[in-house]
Image (cartoon, grey):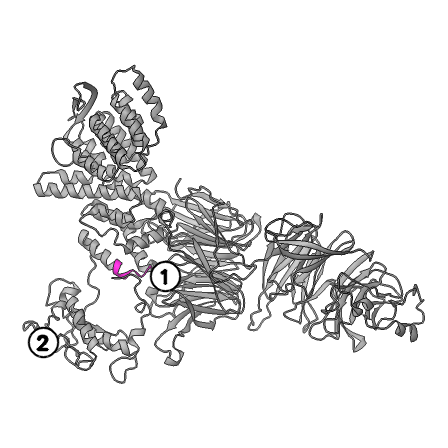
């Protein structure tokens, strides 16, 4: 606390005030940063807080140590220890009442001048101030002053200590007679009052720690140690004391004062300050010289060891309040884990909070929980506001919503699945249309009994195109509506038209007619796309017509459409025309990619359509269809190959058109899953490929398993059942075998065995359920040995008897309930039993029993059958 | 938009770990007050503490749930050098204590000689297996051969990692293509002692776990480690909390089916974020491994997203009021593309 090293003291009563002691005392008030403009003189301490200088006191030179008066009144009274050993009371407060006036300026003078090292106010008897001084062979090193002592007292009976020369007793404010004097011919480096007994004073003396009792100052308890600096009592555990020497901190237990209970790992540089956190148990902060970190030791409760003694272990942490080297720090007396740090070099202050370490966990339902200190925080993703947010949502949330909207389950209008998915994902749209066309054409082909096409439809355009080489027919056609011959060759082959069908451009038939497709596009107001497709079918007039229609339908009137329509009408195939030159340069300024590629097509040389084919903002389906029309057999497979590789790398689902549901398709889906984690789409998509090789791919099975696991985790048990049913339909090999059998008590045969050859549980039991049927009433006995089946615990009828309308229970709503369920399924007639007590009966009876009871219906059985399975008690979170 | 609210936890000391069950309906917390609390989510979404009991004679570091297929089972580990397995007994609670459930200790695993720093159940498909790691650098794998008898656990493997272990994570992939694998992190702060994350894999032939990889670039103390849910991906992703957040991608090299040696991985660091600007304490993946949450000594919880990053900040300086809105600022939007490059 010499001039070179600042120190900080928090006010014991004002949570927003502290003093920086340097060569002078500066009182600061801490507050939130003013939002509007920074007030003059306010120093930013952190992002939210700033300090204002309230007062400066430079009355006392040669300050060595400072201690804040612990009582509320007079406020801001400080004791300052000086280099000559004098202790001066000074104030930074504004209130100058009588009590304050009396105290401020009082000086306490030792007999021999030497440095005052430390000061400590007694926490209970606030009149007592202990001062620790350097060694003097003829004097005491610990002096305890009574600040309330009258000046008269000291002039009066100065009996024993007559050696004391009355030094500069010039004013009446000087006290020279201490209340107690301890530690003769010794040095005192640190002091603190013990909290467990305010008469006890702990002092770090030269080479020993000593406890003095004011009731008997001649005696002391002491232990020899080097760790005598900075003694501090843990405010939460009054027997625990920390002290340090050089780079080492020793922790003492006053009940076992012989040796430190713990020595903390030695630091390479000497320590300068050690302080217990006042707001948290067992947290000790230490600071070493020339360092920018504060090291924290969190002392855990010692486990009670069996037998041998163990050291308590501590969690060590270091925190870095800032980049600059720390001069000193001080814990805030009441704010949790908060401290102010002052830098060594420029006295810059930082308001800093040591955060507890936060542990956190995600739940399967996308909520995040974290624990900080003793508090828990639950953090939920708020339900989306607006459509634009939907795109930002996490895939987990998306999959949950999609599962609830029955995504993937529309097996007739397959393309509608993209609407079930939210309808805002172009990749999914493309995927489900691809699958729709594949399924549609293959179904039609099957109807028409066309040979051999089905497999090729699933195998994607890439393979279709591969097989087509050598069969191309090229033709030069006229521009529709003009007599001019084009120099654009168009290629035809059976495979190419098949590919076009898969792209959705044309429907069945040898003739290529895109009119129906154009109409549907017009309906969806995709004017630019429709126009481009019309143009690729060499119908400029239709293209212009579409653009005009688009212009009139859009309320604002897209000027682009108009301009493009005009430009199109001026088309000329002359190579060196101004039209061509202008179009090829101006097309780059068009924003809509479809408008852009129209001119790219018109201005390209035949066979060199890179500007169309590699325009990545055009849907893959249109690019592929275009390629199938205008690329030669040499160019086409190369282009398709290249595009496929690109799609596979990017995991772009649009590429599924090219790969089909083949191994290539699985590769592509793998990259898609790698990127997005969307196993839901992957599972449903690959199931559509059945029966086929793809379902046997272990990767596909892995996605399906992972998706089912997700549904389980979300408690979407109905969805999971629906998915399994769908899967069973599409992939019969995945049907699980029966897992539960009911065997006869007497012969041990499965009772469903003889009823049905199928080892399928539902089928087997259904035989026992149909009420009123004379043929089925027989099966109240085992089909194997004809012995009767067990009785229902509630109706006491043999199992196999159909459920009557509950003779015992008189509740009419319950009856209605059962009859309603009866119509839906024969579930009420099923066998059910508790795995624990083995009692059971008709499922319907059991359910209604446990609606009102917790114990088993069998008398004297106390089994709580329904509560045994905690998972079974979880409510499914999806509606059936 | 994420919204946080505070829950009165009522622990008497620091909470060290939070853990959700498989369905996200139950939660367990453990604390330096030597107790574990179990929380159940009510229909209205409130968390209610349904059990609280003293579990250890020291700080409880971690708590974790077994898959519900094995019943309602918890494992905890503590500074008292033990790990314990707990099971909930429903049938025995009487009606007076309705709403409170009863947990009984099934076993205490006492093999460690130092503080047990982490405990994790192995993925479900491996059966009921429990892994612990301890400050003396030993990973222990226990198995309950009979899943109906949770008091019988046999120590199957004991692996010495040479470095003080702080955290462990199983690779959750259930694909047969991937042998079972776990990663161990060490909080040894000595840079000279080498890589602090080791990856072990089960070898069918030797029937032992062998080290297949050490992440040599991670030389600072590691506080937490988390494999991302695999979800049928072709590679594994590992998040590490050290002086920053790091995400590694482990792509298994295609190997011939005949070879039986340890798998080789192409290890690639895909992201490194120092936004916490301090030690990172925990990392956690969401169920699809598309979001990563991390916490650091700066008192912030941050969320990281595949292609971009959302920054969440929670001020713990002041007690946040219920429904306090987190900052979700776009200032930190970074184009990452860490998933696939």
Q: Is residue B332 one of those drawn in magenta?
A: no
Q: Is residue A50 above or below residue A740?
A: above
Q: Residue furthest left?
A: A774
* Magenta segment boundaries in residue numbering: A714-719
Please state the horizontal and vertical placement of residue B145, each as a whole percent of the image.
35, 65
Q: Residue at x 71, y 48 (%)?
A: A346
Please state the horizontal and vertical placement of residue A33, each as a whole percent of the image.
61, 53
- Quarter of the image where one finds residue A250: bottom right
Mark 2 vs mark 1, foreground winner is 1
Q: Is residue A717 one of those drawn in magenta?
A: yes
Residue that label 2 marks: A786
Quarter of the picture containing the C terminus of chain A is bottom left
Please state the horizontal and vertical placement of residue B123, each as a whole percent of the image.
36, 58
- Quarter of the image where one finds residue A161: bottom right
SS at circle 1: loop
Mark 2 belongs to chain = A
Mark 1 belongs to chain = B
A353 left or right of B232 in image = right
Please state which of residues A256 and A281 is positioned toward the viewer in this rendering.
A281
Residue that label 1 marks: B22
A316 left or right of A656 in image = right
Quarter of the picture containing the N terminus of chain A is bottom right
- Whether residue A430 is visible: yes
Please state the horizontal and vertical placement of residue A710, each as a whole percent of the image.
32, 56
């Amino acid at each position: 606390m010499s001039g070179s090293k600042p120190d900080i003291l928090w006010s014991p009563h004002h949570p927003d005030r502290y003093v920086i002691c340097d060569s002078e005392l500066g009182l600061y008030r801490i507050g939130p940063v003013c939002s509007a403009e920074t007030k003059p003189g306010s120093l930013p301490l952190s992002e939210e807080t700033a300090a204002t200088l309230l007062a400066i006191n430079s009355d006392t030179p040669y300050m060595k140590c400072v201690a804040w008066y612990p009582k509320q009144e007079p406020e801001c009274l400080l004791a300052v220890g000086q280099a000559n050993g004098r202790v001066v009371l000074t104030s930074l407060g504004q209130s100058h009442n009588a009590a304050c006036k009396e105290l401020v300026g009082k000086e306490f003078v030792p007999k021999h001048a030497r440095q005052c090292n430390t000061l400590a106010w007694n926490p209970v008897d606030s009149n007592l101030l202990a001062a620790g001084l350097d060694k003097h062979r003829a004097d005491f090193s610990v002096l305890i002053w009574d600040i309330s002592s009258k000046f008269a007292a000291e002039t009066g009976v100065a009996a024993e200590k007559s050696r004391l020369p009355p030094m500069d007793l010039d004013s009446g404010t000087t006290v020279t007679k201490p209340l107690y004097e301890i530690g003769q011919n010794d040095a005192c480096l640190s002091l603190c009052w013990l909290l467990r007994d305010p008469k006890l004073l702990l002092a770090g003396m030269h080479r020993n720690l000593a406890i003095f009792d004011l009731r008997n100052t001649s005696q002391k308890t002491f232990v020899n140690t080097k760790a005598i600096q900075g003694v501090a009592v843990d405010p939460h555990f009054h027997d625990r004391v920390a002290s340090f020497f050089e780079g080492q901190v020793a922790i003492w237990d006053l009940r076992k004062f012989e040796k430190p209970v713990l020595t903390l790992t030695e630091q390479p540089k000497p320590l300068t300050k050690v302080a217990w956190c006042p707001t948290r148990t067992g947290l000790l902060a230490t600071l070493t010289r020339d360092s920018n970190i504060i090291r924290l030791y969190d002392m855990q409760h010692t486990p009670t060891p069996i037998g041998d003694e163990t050291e308590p272990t501590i969690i060590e942490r270091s925190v870095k309040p800032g980049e600059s080297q720390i001069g000193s720090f001080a814990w805030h007396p009441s704010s949790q884990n908060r401290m102010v740090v002052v830098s060594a070099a420029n006295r810059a202050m930082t308001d800093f909070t040591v955060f507890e370490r936060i542990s956190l966990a995600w739940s399967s339902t996308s909520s995040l929980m974290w624990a900080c200190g003793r508090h828990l925080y639950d953090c939920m993703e708020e339900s989306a506001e607006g459509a634009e947010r939907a795109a930002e949502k996490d895939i987990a949330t998306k999959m949950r919503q999609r599962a609830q909207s029955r995504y993937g389950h529309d097996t007739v209008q397959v393309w509608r699945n993209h609407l079930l998915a939210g309808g805002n994902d172009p990749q999914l749209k493309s995927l489900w249309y691809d699958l729709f066309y594949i399924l549609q054409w293959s179904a039609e082909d099957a109807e028409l009994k066309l040979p051999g096409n089905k497999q090729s439809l699933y195998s994607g355009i890439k393979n279709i195109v591969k097989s087509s080489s050598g069969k191309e027919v090229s033709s030069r056609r006229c521009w529709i509506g003009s007599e001019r011959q084009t120099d654009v060759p168009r290629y035809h082959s059976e495979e190419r038209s098949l590919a076009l069908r898969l792209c959705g451009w044309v429907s069945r038939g040898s003739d290529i007619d895109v009119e129906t497709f154009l109409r549907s596009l017009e309906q969806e107001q995709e004017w630019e796309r429709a126009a481009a497709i019309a143009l690729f079918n060499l119908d400029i007039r239709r293209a212009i017509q579409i653009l005009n229609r688009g212009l009139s339908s859009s309320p604002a009137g897209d000027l682009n459409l108009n301009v493009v329509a005009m430009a199109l009408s001026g088309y000329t195939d002359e190579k060196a025309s101004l039209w061509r030159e202008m179009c090829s340069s101006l097309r780059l300024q068009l924003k809509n990619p479809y408008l852009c590629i129209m001119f790219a097509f018109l201005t390209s040389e035949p066979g060199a359509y890179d500007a169309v084919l590699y325009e990545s903002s055009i849907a893959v389906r249109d690019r592929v269809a275009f390629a199938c029309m205008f690329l030669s057999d040499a160019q086409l497979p190369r282009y398709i190959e290249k595009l496929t590789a690109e799609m596979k790398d990017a995991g772009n689902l649009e590429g599924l058109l090219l790969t089909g549901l083949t191994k290539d398709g699985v590769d592509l889906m793998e990259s898609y899953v790698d990127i997005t984690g969307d196993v839901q789409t992957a599972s449903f998509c690959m199931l559509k490929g059945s029966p086929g090789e793809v379902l046997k791919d272990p990767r596909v099975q892995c996605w399906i398993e992972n998706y089912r696991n997700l549904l389980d985790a979300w408690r979407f048990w109905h969805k999971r059942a629906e998915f399994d049913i769908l899967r069973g339909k599409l992939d019969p090999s995945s049907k699980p075998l029966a897992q539960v059998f009911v065997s006869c008590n007497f012969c041990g045969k499965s009772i469903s065995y003889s009823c049905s050859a199928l080892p399928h549980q539902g089928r087997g039991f259904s035989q026992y359920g149909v009420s009123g049927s004379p043929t089925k009433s027989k099966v109240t006995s085992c089909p194997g040995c004809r012995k009767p089946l067990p009785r229902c615990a509630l109706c006491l009828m043999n199992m196999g008897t159909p459920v009557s309308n509950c003779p015992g229970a008189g509740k009419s709503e319950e009856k209605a309930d059962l009859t309603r369920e009866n119509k839906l399924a024969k579930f009420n007639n099923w066998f059910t039993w508790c795995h624990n007590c083995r009692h059971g009966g008709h499922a319907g009876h059991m359910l209604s029993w446990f609606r009102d009871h917790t114990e088993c219906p069998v008398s004297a059985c106390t089994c709580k059958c329904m509560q045994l399975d905690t998972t079974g008690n979880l409510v499914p979170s999806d509606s059936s | 938009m994420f919204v946080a609210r505070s829950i009165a936890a009522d622990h008497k000391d620091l909470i060290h770990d939070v853990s959700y069950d498989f369905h996200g309906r139950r939660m367990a917390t453990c604390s330096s007050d030597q107790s574990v609390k179990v929380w159940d989510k009510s229909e209205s979404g409130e968390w209610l503490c349904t059990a609280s009991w003293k579990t250890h004679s020291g700080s409880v570091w971690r708590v974790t749930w077994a898959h519900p297929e094995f019943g309602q089972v918890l494992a905890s580990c503590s500074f008292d050098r033990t790990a314990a397995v707990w099971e909930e007994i429903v049938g025995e609670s009487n009606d007076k204590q309705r709403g409170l459930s009863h947990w009984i200790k099934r076993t205490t695993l006492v093999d460690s000689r130092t503080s047990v720093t982490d405990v994790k159940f192995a993925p479900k498909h491996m059966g009921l297996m429990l892994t612990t790691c301890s400050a003396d650098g030993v990973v222990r794998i226990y198995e309950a051969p009979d899943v109906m008898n949770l008091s019988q656990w046999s120590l199957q493997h004991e692996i010495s990692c040479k470095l003080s272990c702080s955290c462990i994570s199983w690779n959750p992939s259930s694909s047969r293509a991937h042998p079972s694998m776990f990663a161990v992190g060490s909080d040894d702060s000595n840079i000279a002692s080498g890589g602090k994350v080791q990856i072990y894999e089960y070898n069918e032939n030797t029937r032992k776990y062998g080290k297949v990889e050490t992440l040599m670039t991670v030389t600072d103390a590691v506080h937490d480690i988390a494999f991302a849910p695999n979800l049928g991906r072709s590679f594994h992703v590992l998040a590490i909390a050290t002086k920053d957040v790091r995400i590694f991608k482990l792509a298994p090299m295609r190997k011939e089916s005949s070879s039986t040696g340890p798998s080789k991985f192409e290890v690639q660091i895909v992201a490194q974020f120092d936004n916490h600007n301090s030690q990172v304490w925990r990392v956690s993946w969401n169920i699809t491994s598309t979001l990563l949450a991390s916490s650091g000594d700066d008192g912030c919880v941050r969320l990281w997203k595949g292609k971009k990053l959302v920054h969440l900040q929670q001020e713990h300086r002041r007690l946040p009021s219920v429904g306090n809105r987190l900052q979700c600022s776009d200032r930190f939007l970074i184009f990452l593309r860490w998933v696939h490059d």
